[in-house]
Amino acid sequence: MTSPKSLARVTGVLYLLLAVLGMFSATVLDSVVVPGDAAATAGSVLGSRWLFASSLLTWIGIVVVDIAVAVTFYVLLRPVSRTLSLLAAGIRLVYSAMLAAILPNLYDAFLLLTDAERGAGLDDRQVRTMALSALTTFSTGFLLAIVFFGVHLVVLGSLLYRSRYVPRALGILVAAAGAGYIGDSLANLFVAAYGGPASAFFLVPALVGELGLTGWLLVKGVRTAQPDRS
C-alpha cells in the first residue's frame, strides 16, 4: 500500500510535469494566434508547423496527467472526507473531459492550413478564416474549462485545509488560486478590454497557490498527523 507521503510526492511530480507541459502549450498557442488577423495567424502556424504539431501532443499529455492527478488527490484526501475528495476529483475530471473535447479544434486548424485536401473547394481567405475560428473556439472552450478547474481548486483547498497534511495557509492559498482562475476566466469571457493589471490581480494568487502546493508536495510530501474530519 502506498504511503501518503509517497503518494504526495508522486502528485507533486505530476503537478510539476503539468506546469512544464502547460507552459509550453500556452506559449506556443499565444505565439501563433493573432486575434482578429486570420492571415497573420496562418503565417505564424505555417512558419512553426512542427512546433505547433508538438504542442498538440503536449495538450494530449496534459489531459492524461490531469486525470492521473485527479486520482492521486482522491486517494490521498479520501481519509479527510470521502464526499469532498470525490467531488474534487469529479470536477477535475469534468475539466479534463472539456479540455479533451476542444482539442480537435487545434487539430482542425492545423489540417486546414497544412493539408490541401482539407481545404479543397475553399479559397485561401476562407481557409485562413476557418482556421482562426477553430483556434478561437479552442481558446473560448479553454476559458470555460478553467472555470471548472478553479472550482476544483476551491474544493481541493478546503480539503487541504482540513487535512493537516500541509500548512493550513497553503490550503487557503490553493482555494484563493481557484477563485483567481474563476475570476480571470469569467472576466476574459464577459469583460471587454480585460487584461493587464486586472488579470494580474486574479492570476498572481493562482500562481502562488499552485507553485506553493507543488513545491510542498515535492519537498515535504505530507505531514503524518491525523487529518481533521470535523
Image (cartoon, rainbow, N blue to C red):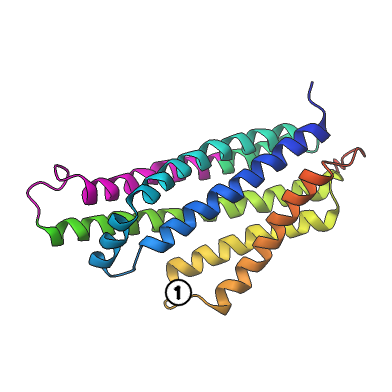
Residue 174 seen: no
Q: Judge left or right: residue 124 versus residue 213.
A: left
Q: Which residue is located at x 15 percent, y 46 percent? A: 116
Q: Which residue is located at x 70 percent, y 39 percent? A: 11
> Where on the picture, by quarter, is residue 173?
bottom right
**24 or 170, nearer to the observer:** 24
Please give the count of numbered marks on the rendered protein.
1
Give the image location of residue 23, x and y in percent.
54, 55
Quadrant occupied by the N terminus: top right
Q: Which residue is located at x 81 percent, y 46 percent? A: 219
Give the image location of residue 179, x and y in percent.
63, 61
Q: Is residue 111 magenta?
A: yes
- Residue interval drawn in magenta: 93-122
Residue 189 seen: yes
Give the image location of residue 48, x and y in percent.
34, 55
Q: Judge left or right: residue 40 versus residue 99.
A: left
Q: Does the magenta stretch include residue 130?
A: no
Determine the main secondary structure of the stretch shown in magenta.
helix
Q: Residue furthest left?
A: 121
Q: Name the residue under label 1.
A: 191
Say few, some or many: other residues with alpha carbon within 10 Å of mark 1 (under 14 / 14 to 19 / 20 or more). few
> Where on the picture, by quarter, is residue 13?
top right
Q: Which residue lies furthest to the right in this view?
A: 225
Q: What residue type is labelled 1?
A: Val
Q: In this view, does 84 lie above or below 191?
A: above
Q: In this view, does 81 lie above or below 150?
A: above
Q: Judge left or right: residue 176 versus residue 45.
A: right
Q: Judge left or right: residue 187 versus residue 1.
A: left
Give the image location of residue 154, x and y in percent.
67, 53
